Image (cartoon, rainbow, N blue to C red):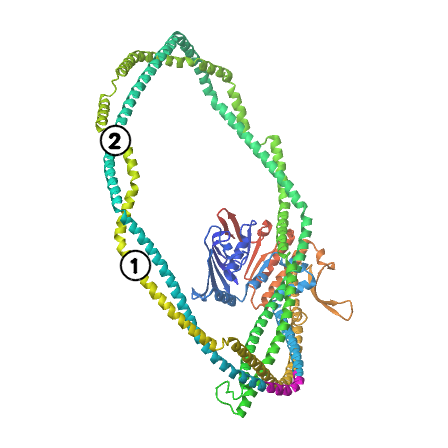
Amino acid sequence: MIPQKLRLKNFLSYQQLALDFSGLHVACICGANGAGKSSLLEAISWAVWGASRAASEDDVIHVGSKETQVDFTFIAGGEIYRVIRTRSRNSSTSLEFQVQSEGKFKSLTERKVRSTQQSIISHLKMDYETFVNSAYLRQGRADEFMLKRPSDRKQILADMLALSQYDELAERAKDIARTSKAESAVLENLLAHLQSQILAGAEIVPQLETLRSRLTELQTWESRDRAKLQAVEDLQKQYNSVSQQLTWQQQQQTSLSSNLTQTERQLASQQKQLQLLENYLRERSLILQDYERYQLLSNQEAELERKFQKYQKLSERRGDFSHKLASLQSELKGQLRHYQAQLESLVQQETDLQGVLSRATEIEAAIAELHKARAVLQEFDRLHAQSTPLVHRYQTLKHQLEREETKLTAKLEELVAKRDQLQLQVKDRDRLLSHAQELDRQIEALQKKQVYQQRVHEKGLERRDFLERLKSRLADSEAAFNKLEAKMRQLTVPNAPCPLCDRPLDEAHWQLVQKKHRQESRDLQADIWVVKEQQAASNCEIEVLREEYRNLKKELAPLNDLIQRKGTLQERLKAIAEAVQRLGLIEAEIQDLSDRLQTKNYLREAWEEMELIDKNIHKFAYDEKNHALARGDVERWRWAEIKQSELKNAQRQADHLSQKIPDLQLKINQLEERLTKNLIDLEVQHELEQCDRALAQLSYDPDRHQQLRTQKQELTTSLLRYQELTRAEQEYPELQQQVSHLQQSQTKHQQEFQTISAQITGLQAQVQALHGDHAQEIHGLRQNLQNWRSQMDTLLAQIGSLQQSQQQLEQSRQREQETLSQIEAARQRQRIHNELYQAFGKNGIQALMLENVLPQIEVEANQILAQLSDRQLNVRFITQKSGKKSDRLIETLDIEIADTRGTRPYETYSGGEAFRINFAVRLALSRVLAQRKGSTLQTLIIDEGFGSQDQLGCDRLVSAINAIAPDFECILVITHMPQMKEAFNTLIEVSKNDEGSTVQLVG
């Protein structure tokens, strides 16, 4: 894959970007930490494979944006391809794949994103894992390989070569061998069971004879009890019929008795009511006399009620006029008090104004002194106006110098605090390095257990799936067996028809059907036993896997915490490395600031201007204190202006009061005269007199009105008695008819009651003649019949079971031979897959493939290392070494490193030398891995840390990169070191501001 063009829209820290890789061979991507260098590679991997470092797919979208898009054009296999991947926030991802044909892009996009992704991998011949382990040299990968134990190195190499597929094949072979072993054990148990069945088959014939004899005896007893039951049931039917008639007649007798009682009660009630009505009719004349007197009193009361209404209205009107007259009188008195208060206030004001007018001479003298003080103040104001600009400029310069001194002092204090903080941070570097190595060791051990845990989980899922299939198979077999058993029971009944076609069977066909059913029954029962044995074995294996998975889960609990701690430590170590560089710069800056503050070597022009202004200010004879005294004199005599204004106002007010006081005195005299003569409101007084005359003419007597009300209340009962008399005259004839009708109904019910009583006596005699209820005897006979039937069903089932056992006995003899053959086949299958397990294992094909690939890696690594070290360093891979016993070899992967002084451990080499070794081995691994995957490595991206290299080491790394440049179409080196980026002719400079990251192509 050779990159050509990259367009970004709202991806990570980039808002808009268009970068053209065409013509670039070796280029350096440089910029500060966090500027967005790695985001360019993230954009390529996300566009092509949909993979990035983001936790979720929406995290790749620029903050504040709703959609991101990456458009990437590259060359692969001589063709130009284009990938456009788009993602909307909280939505789906779209992917478009195109190939250039005749100057235009032709779509290769499939219907689904997953299918399109697979098409991209197929055309590119490289998946994401191959890309990051070959074309992309990520920082830290080579160190990880070199610092591992020999056995761990083999595992890393196996992972990079994707040898895990052989582990899966080995596990599958092991599972098949284990299954074959379990199947063999189940078959052996089945064989033992079949042999025990064959031995027990000799006792079946005598048991069948005994059971058939007992069945005949039970059938005889059952026929005898059934005939007896028929006779007793006939008697019971007659008894039930007569009993039902007797019960119905008794119910009729009870109903008639109830009706007769109810009729008697109604007759007594009606007769009592008839007597009450007759009493009202006898008192008719007295009731009418009281009612006429009540009507007369009601008419008189109505007349007095009308007078009472008029009396109330006149009284209310007289009260309103009286209240209005009193209110007017009170209002006049209030006006009189108001005018009297105003007169007193005006007289007091006139007295106060005379006091102010008496100070006129004193105020004129003070005004003359005020004019003199103001003349002196004007002279001082003139001098102050001339010197003020110079004073202001002097103060401005002084404040400017003070701010600069404060700023430099604060910066000095900040730098000192940073220096102390960086010194503390650098102090912990060794301890953090040791802690980081310990965390790496713990994480590596737990990650291996995590891989093993996943395998245990997958194996458990496979066992559970197998168990579910066994359950389904067992249910089907048991259902078929139960259905076959039902058919077999039908065949045991004499003259039973065919269970399939329901036709009669002769002896030959009956034997043939029974033989066929017995054979099917034996097959189903054997299959059920096999499935149950397999279920037991699978359950045991699942329990073991569950326990192992739980133990591994407990052991892996600290893994996430360790990984987080490792990331934190790496960030701290990276910060410490940067702190060491910053510490020297800060020390120099602190010294420079201290010197400038001590010598006041800052803002020299401001210091010189202040001295010149100070000389000019002394030329003016201006004194700030005298100026302040002059302002005080003016303020001291300013009261005269206020008093002069008050004097003028007092003169005007005195003239106004001399006119207003006589007017108020006249109004007061007029109000006092109206109140004395009672001349308030003549119209209201006239209306009040008319109301008094109307009340006298009405002649309403409240006592007479109350006396009539009392007399009328006493005669209220006469109205009720009159109403009862009217009702009695209306209801008396109808009530007489109802009493006559009830007497006739009573006579009729008594006759019917006597007739039913005679019928009940006759039915009771018939019940006694039938000798009572036979229900208990019938229940006992039915219980006997049920008991005989139950025993007969049990015997039939036992006979059918024994007949089936006879059929199964023959089937067991055939099954015994088949099981022996199956046991031999299972053992043979177990032996074959045990051998395959060994072949696919670590010491089989995988070891052979590692033996073949290691020489290629060694040659590639030494070629690169020769360029990096001027042929001073050499590596060699050792795959076997002698064990404690001289005749035994141990599989390993040791790395021997030699220089001009000989072979010595990897840990004894300096950081720069170790980095060159790591770089060479990592690049060799990438090349070989790409070859093994069947793809050509045309692009190389190097993101290794070059901080451990001196200038010579950096030059050699650059030389090595340039030396291998002909092998690649495009090489991209990512660094933030200035001395490294100066070694490249083409730079891709990445910077970041508030709006996001930007890129500039230089060279």
Tag 2: residue type? Lys
**Which numbered disc, 2 or 1, marks the residue closer to the eye?**
1
Residue at x 49% of width, y 89% of height? 504
Residue 852 position within the rendered picture, expressed as x and y whole percent measured from the top left:
65, 70
Q: Is residue 309 above or below residue 29?
A: above
Who is closer to the viewer here, 211 or 830? 211
In three-dimensional space, the C-alpha distance between marks 2 and 1, rounded to whole angstroms, equals 59 Å
Quarter assignment of residue 154: bottom right
Quarter assignment of residue 188: bottom right
Which residues fall within the magenta stretch?
197-214
Q: Is residue 954 left or right of residue 702?
A: right
Q: Secondary structure at mark 1?
A: helix
Tag 1: residue type? Gln
Tag 2 residue:
313
Residue at x 55% of width, y 52% of height? 30
Q: Secondary structure at mark 2?
A: helix
Who is closer to the viewer here, 352 or 890? 352
Q: Is residue 203 magenta?
A: yes
Dot 1, crowdedness within 10 Å: few (<14), some or many (≥20)?
Answer: some
Dot 2, crowdedness within 10 Å: few (<14), some or many (≥20)?
Answer: few
Q: Choose the circle earlier in sequence order: 2 or 1.
A: 2
Q: Are marks 2 and 1 in contact (CB under 8 Å)?
A: no
Q: Is residue 709 left or right of residue 574?
A: left
Residue 699 position within the rendered picture, expressed as x and y whole percent measured from the top left:
23, 28
Q: Is residue 326 above or below residue 152?
A: above
Mark drawn on residue 978: none
Chief SS of the magenta region: helix
Residue at x 55% of width, y 63% of height? 128
Residue 451 visible in image: yes
Mark drawn on residue 738: 1
Residue 435 position within the rendered picture, expressed as x and y whole percent measured from the top left:
68, 52
